[in-house]
């Protein structure tokens, strides 16, 4: 088990963002880090192996969306942007292409009352996430091995049912939009994690935004603590229903992005 000193930056970030960070949450993050490092020895889950790097590049990076999720949810239910503690939010969120569980697992710890679905196409990653869910005693969360093209197609129980879709997956913005927007209900949001250099991608995504029913409403830039790593959160509001033909069959969005 890693000593809590490895998570002092996380504790300070939690204090600043009003995330509940008592003994239970502290242990959950410790156990998540420990299991990630241990399983990564045989499973190749992440290139980030040092606990202090995990704290910053996985945990804090994932949690940067917490204030944004709180304000958007408060505006949706109260029709005004007001203060809302993360532990009181009860939205439905899907993490598309979650990989080893980021940003979904840290966000779930921050939002214990919300309903989460973590989706990835590789069974080994989902098996790892299920192990984490059991070990951390998380509730209101499920992990599904599936492709977005299948899970969000017309007639699926997951199509246009989520308040939020998040993704930290490595894919171009037009491709991510085709994967993510079909999951979100009208007036819901996609929050996409990107490196700081997103401007060219954003220009290339204008046709996809219009076609899929999305509108960029905010971009929040930040630097990871004690680094020069610039990150961005792109906030896309779902303004109209996504046409039935999207997402296209598996593989098509990445091979032929909407232009």
Image: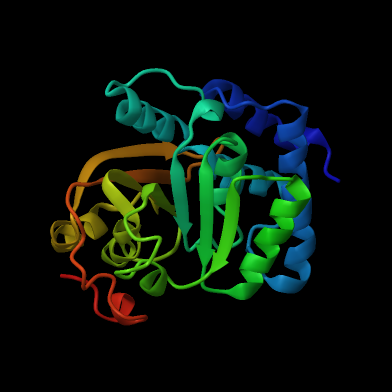
Question: Residue 201: x percent and y percent?
Answer: 25, 59
The residue positioned 32% from the left and 76% from the top of the image is 254
Res. 103 visible in picture: no
Residue at x 75% of width, y 38% of height: 6
Quarter containing the C terminus: bottom left
In front here: 259 or 197? Answer: 259
Query: Residue 50's x, y, as percent?
Result: 72, 52
> Which one is nearer the viewer's eye here, 202 or 141?
141
Left or right of 259 on screen, residue 17: right
Q: Nearer the viewer, residue 141 or 38?
A: 141
Q: On the picture, is 94 further left or further right than 242?
A: right
Q: What percent of the width, then of the height, locates residue 25?
A: 71, 34
Q: Is residue 58 above or below residue 129?
A: above
Which quarter of the picture shows residue 36? Answer: bottom right
Identified at 51% across, 23% down, the residue is 85
Image vertical order of residue 144 relative to residue 91, above or below = below
204 up-or-down from 82: above or below: below
In this rendering, does residue 161 appear at all? yes
Residue at figure coordinates x 33%, y 63% from the top left: 176
Q: How many marks?
A: 0
Q: Quadrant of residue 19?
A: top right
Image coordinates for residue 204, horizontal then vertical, percent: 19, 62
Instruction: Kindly give the residue lying farthest to the right in the view shown.
Output: 1
Q: Quadrant of residue 158?
A: bottom left
């Amino acid at each position: 088990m890693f000593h809590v000193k490895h998570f002092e930056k996380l504790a300070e970030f939690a204090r600043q963002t009003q995330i509940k960070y008592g003994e239970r949450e502290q242990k959950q993050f410790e156990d998540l880090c420990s299991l990630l490092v241990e399983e990564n020895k045989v499973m190749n889950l992440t290139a980030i192996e040092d606990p202090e790097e995990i704290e910053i590049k996985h945990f804090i990076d994932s949690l940067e969306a917490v204030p944004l999720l709180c304000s958007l949810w408060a505006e949706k239910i109260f029709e005004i942007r007001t203060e809302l503690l993360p532990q009181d939010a009860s939205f439905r969120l899907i993490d598309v292409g979650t990989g080893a569980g980021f940003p979904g697992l840290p966000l779930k710890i921050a939002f214990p009352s919300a309903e989460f679905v973590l989706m990835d196409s590789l069974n080994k990653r989902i098996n790892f996430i299920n192990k984490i869910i059991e070990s951390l005693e998380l509730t209101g969360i499920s992990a599904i091995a599936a492709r977005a093209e299948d899970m969000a197609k017309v007639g699926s129980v997951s199509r246009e049912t989520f308040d939020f879709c998040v993704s930290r997956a490595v894919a171009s913005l037009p491709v991510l939009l085709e994967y993510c927007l079909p999951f979100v209900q009208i007036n819901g949001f996609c929050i996409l994690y990107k490196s700081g250099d997103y401007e060219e991608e954003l220009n290339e995504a204008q046709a996809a935004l219009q076609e899929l029913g999305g509108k960029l409403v905010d971009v929040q830039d930040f630097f990871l603590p004690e680094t020069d790593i610039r990150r961005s959160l792109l906030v896309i509001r779902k303004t109209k229903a996504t046409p039935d033909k999207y997402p296209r069959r598996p593989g098509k969005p990445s091979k032929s992005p909407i232009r």
